[in-house]
Image (cartoon, rainbow, N blue to C red):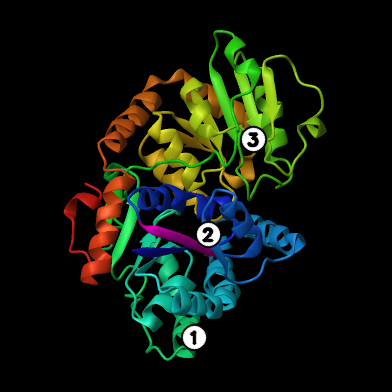
Amino acid sequence: MRVLFTANPGTGHWQPLVPFAEALHGAGHEVAFAATPATGAAITALGFRCFQAGADEPAEERQAARERMAALGTQGPVWVMPNLFAGTWAAGRLPDLITVCSEWRPALVVREDVEFAGCVAAEHLGLPHAAVQVTAWRPRVGPLVVDPLNRLRAGVGLPPDPDLAMLFRYLLIAPGPPGYRDAAAPLPPTARAVRHVAFDRSGDESLPAWIDALPDRPVVYATMGTAFNRIPGILEAILAGLREEPITLILTTGRDRDPAAFGPQPAHVHIERYVPQSLLFPRCDLVVTHGGSGTVMAALGHGLPMVIVPVSADQPDNAHRCEQLGVARAIAPDNRTPEAIRDAVRAVLGDPSFRRNAERLKEEIARLPGPEMVVGWLERLAMDKRPFAAAPETTAP
């Protein structure tokens, strides 16, 4: 069986697909990705075949888009979803994806949930398709993409889809525990919950040598991810707020920022470009994060409470849900001060209920099926070409 994976640029979009691709490969299936050249180079380095689909944006344009999203805050998706994800990015990839599918002839297409060209190409060619949820579940986003997706459909001879039935028509693979879901926004009936498996080691990355000599004090890890790590002032506020606290602070800047630019730090503050969270989280007591879905699920998978400093995209949604569940404190966009961050860290470290609530979700995550179960689902989908029936266990209680 051949399976084609499609994703938007950015590690937060394509890396969550890797565990499923690896499971399929391990089961003897042929796997390939379709992505822009820069993303494709990273995927190819992992040993996967990757077809080109679309073109890379200049770095300046991508950074300008991130800054615009940051400025819009919670309204960022109102601009980015119709104009980029379902707009120019999807339109730029669609012709290439149709060509790839026509020539390579996969049995099905698997996309991340905000990569829209993959499902349009699949429907055009009569292929079943599945989605992997890599962002927070946000039903309000749907109306934003109806018009641009219908334009894409019309361009390949498909009828309008005003109810967006196409998006999750066959199968939605939803990494994360049902207890994290909001009952007011249930997943579609084709959803299946799976255990979140982080993929964050694309090479020989390991823990820094100093990690084994840490003193006996709480370990706080801080990150703003890979897309919003250059938003001015946030990492600086985290450092200013926490460098004098009786903790070990580990802050990662992202591969495109120089730790030396933050100046000298006291001995209990460690600044690195990148440390794999899968290796670091077992050593941590608390995570300070932007609230990206991958980091949130990885933290909960280790039973770690959080302080969330959301910027845009789905981060405010994750921050709100984590506060509802008692696993995090959130910092409002107009309150990203060193004092607010310090107070939130003190509050979470000082209240054991945050850790207990996170541990409960960790236990729920551990009981979920892993990527090997998804292999069977995809085999069934390729064979039957029918939507998965409703599964009540995938909705929030």
Which three-letter amino acid code belongs to the residue tagged 2? Answer: Arg
Q: Quadrant of residue 154?
A: bottom left
Q: Position of residue 81 (x, y in %)?
A: 53, 68
Label ID, residue 274? 3
Where disc 1 sits, the SS reads helix
| Left or right of 331 on screen, residue 304 | left
Closest to the observer, 305 or 123: 123
Q: Is residue 376 above or below residue 327?
A: below
Residue beneath disc 2: 49
Closest to the observer, 387 or 202: 202
Q: Quadrant of residue 304?
A: top left
Residue beneath disc 1: 151
Instruction: Say which residue appears at 72% left-offset and 14% top-offset.
Output: 267
Residue span colored magenta:
29-34
User: Of the residues tagged 1 and 3, which is closer to the observer?
Assistant: 3
Determine crowd level at label 3: few under 14, some 14-19, many 20+ residues with C-alpha closer than 10 A.
Answer: many
